[in-house]
């Protein structure tokens, strides 16, 4: 079907079909964040503060790192619409290498996030807990990205959100916290 021949209703339907998975993934991510906040708030105020600091720190790095994929998408779309599969592969591969290199540069910030938070004036206990949460989150993100990359190479990847700062990351944090009960 030609795009010029589509009615407004057909355009709206196509946009909703494209948008619903994104809407669902964002709502799921928000629900995981809300669940994390509630669980940590019930557990301990220091744990909640550490989780919020680590998640905020992670989000800042995530936004910086996602800039490469935002730049690659229109380049891939342009090459694909021009019918140039070699350029599609080339841009995708270079974007992947650039993202991997940038992630390697960001990992020291993850491992030293406790010291960085101390330099920013956070309490030592909260900075240490935030570093624990953050490094666990970073390791899970790398494992998830590697698994998704392997699926992509085999052609089995799906557009599903992967939560690296979600509830499964709370387990290592909660087991390392001092019990105040």
Image (cartoon, rainbow, N blue to C red):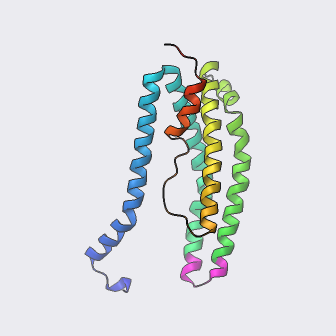
Q: Is residue 6 above or below residue 175?
A: below
Name the quarter where the N terminus is drawn: bottom left
Q: Is residue 81 left or right of residue 142?
A: left
Position in image of residue 12 (x %, y %): 30, 70
Residue 94: within the magenta? no
Residue 85: within the magenta? yes
Position in image of residue 168 (x %, y %): 53, 39
Question: Is any atom of residue 26 visible in this view?
Answer: yes
Report the residue at 64% width, 28% height from top: 117
Q: Is residue 72 above or below residue 168?
A: below
SS majority, magenta: helix
The boundaries of the magenta stretch are 78-87
Quadrant for residue 72, please give it: bottom right
Report the residue at 35% width, 67% height from top: 17
Q: Is residue 152 left or right of residue 102?
A: left
Report the residue at 57% width, 84% height from top: 82
- Number of dots carrying numbers: 0
Question: Is any atom of residue 123 visible in this view?
Answer: no
Q: Is residue 100 above or below residue 56?
A: below
Q: Is residue 69 above or below residue 86?
A: above
Position in image of residue 177 (x %, y %): 58, 22
Report the residue at 64% width, 25% height from top: 128
Position in image of residue 169 (x %, y %): 55, 37
């Amino acid at each position: 079907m030609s795009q010029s021949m589509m009615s407004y209703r057909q355009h709206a339907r196509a946009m909703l079909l494209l948008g619903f998975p994104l809407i669902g993934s964002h709502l799921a991510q928000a629900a995981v964040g809300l669940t994390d906040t509630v669980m940590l708030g019930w557990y301990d105020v220091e744990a909640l503060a550490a989780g919020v600091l680590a998640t905020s720190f992670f989000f800042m790095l995530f936004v910086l790192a996602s800039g490469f994929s935002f730049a690659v998408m229109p380049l891939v779309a342009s090459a694909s619409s021009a019918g140039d599969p070699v350029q599609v592969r080339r841009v995708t591969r270079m974007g992947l290498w650039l993202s991997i290199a940038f992630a390697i540069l960001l990992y020291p910030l993850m491992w030293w996030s406790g010291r960085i938070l101390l330099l920013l004036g956070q309490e030592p206990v909260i900075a240490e807990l935030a570093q624990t949460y953050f490094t666990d989150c970073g390791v899970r993100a790398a494992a998830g990205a590697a698994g998704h990359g392997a699926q992509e190479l085999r052609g089995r990847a799906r557009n599903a959100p992967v939560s690296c700062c979600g509830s499964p990351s709370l387990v290592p944090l909660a087991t390392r916290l001092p019990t105040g009960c």
